[in-house]
Image (cartoon, coloured by chain):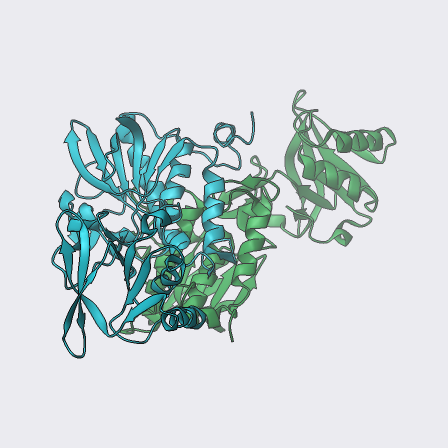
Chain colours: A green, B cyan
Amino acid sequence: MKETDILIVGAGPVGLFTVFEAGLLGLNCTLIDNLDKPGGQCAELYPEKPIYDIPGVPFQTAQEHVDALLKQIEPFDYDLNLSQRVQTISEDGDFWIVETNEGNKFKTKNIFIAAGAGSFEPRRPANLENPDLFLNKGVTYAVRNMDQYKDKEVFIFGGGDSALDWTVELSKIASHVSLVHRRDQFRGAYKTEQEMRDLVKNEKVSLFTPHLINEIVGDKKVTGVKLKNFETLEISEHKADELLFLFGLNKKLGPILDWEIDLEDKKISVNTTTFETSKKGIFAVGDINHYEGKLDLILCGFHETTLAVQEAFKRINPGERVPFGYTTSNKKLQKKLGVID
Amino acid sequence: MKETDILIVGAGPVGLFTVFEAGLLGLNCTLIDNLDKPGGQCAELYPEKPIYDIPGVPFQTAQEHVDALLKQIEPFDYDLNLSQRVQTISEDGDFWIVETNEGNKFKTKNIFIAAGAGSFEPRRPANLENPDLFLNKGVTYAVRNMDQYKDKEVFIFGGGDSALDWTVELSKIASHVSLVHRRDQFRGAYKTEQEMRDLVKNEKVSLFTPHLINEIVGDKKVTGVKLKNFETLEISEHKADELLFLFGLNKKLGPILDWEIDLEDKKISVNTTTFETSKKGIFAVGDINHYEGKLDLILCGFHETTLAVQEAFKRINPGERVPFGYTTSNKKLQKKLGVID
């Protein structure tokens, strides 16, 4: 079990900048994020889009903003735990024990929830009762490893770019690919749609429109799938090894809801002095928190976490004055930043 | 009398960013600053120093930061009133009437005090009762126009770079320059001190150390000066036309102290929802304000003024919902920013 000064849930801009402010005070951090890269929705949803309202940065793409923050925290002591979600917390005296869904355990005095609008979760097919029953036993929500689909009967569900891209891509290695969508129009790139339709013409791919899934067939793992025709309401059954649902991502608070922290408007309530939640040592910063006057802007999260880090320092060093200085003039800070020896 | 949506006292980083956030909401601004350029102490005191703690900007000199903010507010409607100080305010219904020491008058619903540590005021000679009696009548605290000293008997007071620089410079045009300092050591650049001492050797400059001013002689304007020798306590009288006091700058709240706004620790008390002071429509943002947990960091000022601008909008458009959007995705905001037509 790793001990860390601040455990940060979410590696978006506010989580990353937390490492900077903590580092100035000599604190180390552990970042946990459900995505497979740092940057939160800036990196995942709109990396190429320009942001105009970062103070002092007239123009920067979202990914450039993330890259700048990563550069800014380079001098400091932190580690990044990706592709996993914080699952449970429990109290241990002054400490919190945090466990992820990958079984990693951390001990910390300070949890910073910087999870933006929540963790990104793939949308499930709405009409199935428990699609996760077959999770990784024939049901997947993202392609992690292409080999999994090699020489398999694959059914892909969805109408966007991901569904089209993977239909084209997996048709090269699967024994057969079927694409299922509730209507015969697609939201993806025109060019990829044409590729897909050419594959259908050449019988490399089967296209089921307007169809949706009706039932997963299988015992311990998926062996087939029942599809319903949206117009005729006819049900058809097919042999299937892999069902790949590509309906996009949902943002969800997820397991944080089970931590019994006070909420308001589905956001986590905090005070505006330390941005601590109703639980001692648990802070919420950035878009995920709520207080009177709250605005969901990155610049507000930067302020919030900077103040919260002060309180984290006090919890780790009770009775000690929090050191304060300006990076323009303070030699100690400049040493920490590695800009002077 | 000019009417403006937000009158901003102080054109430092937080004052400048206020123009941006106000502009996004369609509000115009008027900036007033005592200095002769925008940027506050970033531009005046340490333009060449690097700042490391602006979020998302790993490295930037203070002047580069100011330049970036000026570029960021280019698309918006604001005017800059420099080299003048806000002097008096008075109420006029829902409005405030603001007057500067240059006699300029403004009418506004919202005053934002973004004056940092206060306005920069030249330090006065401590032992004279009212040196400002002769202000611009033979007493100056900065060289605004060199011609003023041409062919004059000039006495320069001070021991830093400014005093040394101007002694050397004005000795070229004045009829004679005397430098007065309380001790025979100088805090300025060694090279300039040597130049000054060479001028003294060549009788182009008189050096009075350890001396200080004892009295200004004159009726309607300065005609002479009495100096006191610090060691012998002897008083000497000299003919003089211009007395130039270069004792550095003090940061002072100045006339704002007369506005009867609640203070705490010499800072202006605000709430953390709208950053409004004890007076309706008067806000304080950045280093000049105080609330529990306050940190004097530029990034905190950015947050504060962004929230305060929301309230300013409501005061101007009562009952209207404050528009909100992200610059990454909101076409209306992008139009305002001038990045799309």
**Residue B335 placement, left or right of A206:** left
Visible in this render: residue A217?
A: yes
- Give left or right: position of A118 versus B203: right
Q: Residue at x 26, y 31 (%)?
A: B106
Outermost residue, top side: A231
Residue A39 location (% of width, % of height)? 55, 52
How many numbered circles are shown?
Answer: 0
Query: Which residue sits at x=47%, y=62%?
Result: A19
Q: In the current view of this chain or complex, which residue is farthest to the bottom?
A: B231
Residue nearer the viewer, A5 or A136: A5
Quadrant position of residue B197: bottom left
Give x and y (percent) for residue A326: 39, 63
Asked which quadrant contains residue A179, the reply is top right
In the displayed structure, would residue A261 be above or below residue A292?
below
Q: Position of residue A126 (x, y in %)?
A: 56, 36
Residue at 53% x, 37% y is: B328
Q: Position of residue B139 (x, y in %)?
A: 23, 53
Res. A115 in view: no
A240 or B109, nearer to the observer:
B109
